[in-house]
Image (tube, rainbow, N blue to C red):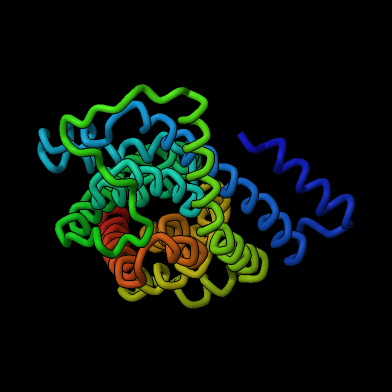
Amino acid sequence: MFEWWHRLVSHFVFETLGLSPESAAGSALDFFLYDTVKILVLLAVIIFLITFVRSYFPTEKIRDWLEGKHPIVGHVAAAVFGIITPFCSCSAIPLFLGFIQARIPLGVTFSYLISAPMNNEIAIAMLFSLFGWKVTALYIGMGLLVAIVAGIVIGKMHLEDEVLIKPPPVKPPHFEEAPIPVKERLKEAWDYTLDLLKKVGLYVLAGVGVGAFIHGYVPSELIVKYAGGDAWYAVPLATILGVPMYSSAAGIMPMIEALTQKGMLMGTALSLMMAITALSLPEAMILKKILSVKLIAIFFGVVAVGIMLTGWVFNAVLS
């Protein structure tokens, strides 16, 4: 979808500016320019479309459908939907915000936010090609389980008041209004999108900036040094080391392959991968404008526990 933009950015950074792709500065600048535009465009397009479509379909119907099902149905559907959306943790935020604006239950929206970067089809395809179907199947199963259970836990805590950007008010039952012209619906959707971009735009720039710095300047050798052993604490240490980093599943996969070849246990390596893709400092910085610090901390804590359990399970099963 954004390949043309990535080619343009890479040409500018590596050809026009003359920076080397292997240099920290070149890698960081290429990452920053590409991801900033990608996330802002995704944010604008998704929020605009959801706002426009929502003007035709009352959101209470979505809630009624979910309320009529077993509570786990929404979480499973959101987690599975994450598999078909090839987003990193920051790129998944626009759709996550769109779900909040559509009044989808909070726990369900988190099941999507966790699953999308961790279980997308790019990660699955690359895992299969590098490590085979057994590792891939176990990864998909554990990834979906983490997303579903974490979403259920967060939903049960009733933290809706910790969401800083509130959805539009719900119309009263049986409320009838005169038909709204399409042009007016488009204008309202556009105005709402611009207002939202003004609120979160600086946070996107700051978050991607931090991610770009880490992407370019944090060496993988540091991770191998401290989390490459088979001690029980290697998994939580890999998870903690992964949180400040930022990359997509496709971007981090070559490093995961290299780490396993250097002796890192598969579960430890995948815990690192899950932490980098599903949790990241740039993601937290962007979410800061949408969610309270309390809710972000709970989100990171619940998911981190799930990732650690996944790593230990992998190490136990594959050892």
Residue depicted at 23% across the width and 43% down the height: 75
On the image, which quarter does residue 163 sit in? bottom left
- Pick the front one: 25 or 138: 25
Q: Quadrant of the N terminus?
A: top right
Does 319 sit left or right of 26 as displayed?
left
Task: State left or right for residue 14 relative to residue 60.
Answer: right
**Residue nearest the viewer, comparing 190 with 129:** 190
Seen in the picture, residue 111 relative to 189 is either above or below; the reply is: below
Q: Nearer the viewer, residue 143 or 213?
A: 213
Residue 256 x %, y % = 51, 56
| Residue 161 percent location from the top left of the image | 25, 62
Q: Is residue 6 above or below residue 181?
A: below
Res. 305 visible in picture: no
Instruction: Indicate the position of residue 255 as horizontal and vertical percent values.
Output: 56, 57
Of residues 140 and 28, the one drawn nearer to the viewer in this rendering: 28
Q: Position of residue 112 (x, y in %)?
A: 33, 45
Among the 4 quarters of the image, the one containing residue 51: top left
- Residue 23, quarter of picture: bottom right
Q: Quarter of the image for the C terminus: give it.
A: bottom left
Q: Report the side of 218 relative to 318 (left or right).
A: right
Whether 250 is drawn above or below 161: the answer is above
Point 56% across, 74% down: residue: 222
> Is residue 163 something one can see in this rendering?
yes
Above or below residue 76? Residue 117 is below
Q: Residue furthest front?
A: 178
Q: Residue at x 23, y 33 (%)?
A: 62
In this rendering, position of residue 283 left or right of residue 135: right
